[in-house]
Amino acid sequence: MCISKKRIVALEEFQKKYNLKFSNIELLNQAFIHTSYTNENNIDILNSYERLEFLGDAVLKLIISDILFNENLNYKEGKLTKLRAEIVSDKHIFEYAKQLGFEDLIVLGKNEKKQGGQKKESILACAFEALLGAIFLEYNEQGYNKTYEFIKENFLEDILSTEKNISILNPKAILQEYTQGINQKLPIYNLVDEKGKEHNKTFYVEVLFQNEIIGKGSAKSIKQAQAEAALDAINNLGINKEE
């Protein structure tokens, strides 16, 4: 793919800001190429970020496992697994991608761009994994070390702060256990409203127990809105569950 001078400048600025040095600028650029762009321009899909995403996903899981294993020496396997799952989830690494300015770097097809693809959680999260895959490949024998360094330099504080919420990584399960302990009944989740355009809706959910509203939540998916409502209920009820 031909890369414009303007694009090269943007990629060079990104590298300088985050202490990266790519000898293969095409590889870095590929980490930001969405399949909608390759499809619309009759470019081989192998030039999109999909293969890099596959590699980066594995690298990310290994790095987070490495960090958690060494930082949390007293945690059992189950707790480490839950914490890692939260950190590598799309909603989490989507925030990392936004922090790095991916919205300005992602390359989309015209239709996807019109639909706000540069702000979509799934697209930016995949691009973040693709970037890790690109770093891993670019630095050859030092690929893992450089990618590990990149993650620690930019996100270590966030990774370790997630530890504080380890006991509520699955708020729906915790709330269910609590309500069943009272009278064997489940909390009820009601979708009370949804706002926004079809491709970018926000869902509003209330959770009830014994006919009373005990929590409220909103998010871009019903599932996440339910989780937010459960978390709100946990806080309102003063539930503090440690594994």
Image (spheres, rainbow, N blue to C red):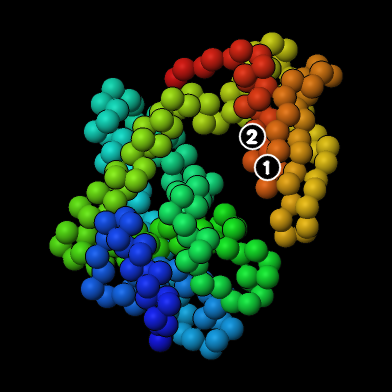
- Which quadrant: the N terminus? bottom left
Image: 59 above or below 42: above
Q: Is residue 62 visible?
A: no
* Residue 155 appears in view: yes
Q: Is residue 48 left or right of residue 143?
A: right
Q: Amino acid at mark 2?
A: Ala
Q: Position of residue 68 (x, y in %)?
A: 31, 35
Tell me: 133 left or right of 185: left
Q: For the view shown, which residue lies furthest in the left direction?
A: 141
Which residue position holds label 1? 219
Residue at mark 2: 227
Q: Amino acid at mark 1?
A: Ala
Is the residue marked by circle 1 packed among few (<14), some (14-19), or many (20+) residues within 10 Å? some
Disc 1/disc 2 C-alpha distance (Å): 9 Å
Q: Name the residue rendered at 78%, 52% in the picture.
A: 196
217 to the left or right of 104: right
132 lies above or below 90:
below
Quarter holding the C terminus? top left
Counting from the top left corner in percent of width and height, residue 208 is at: 78, 24
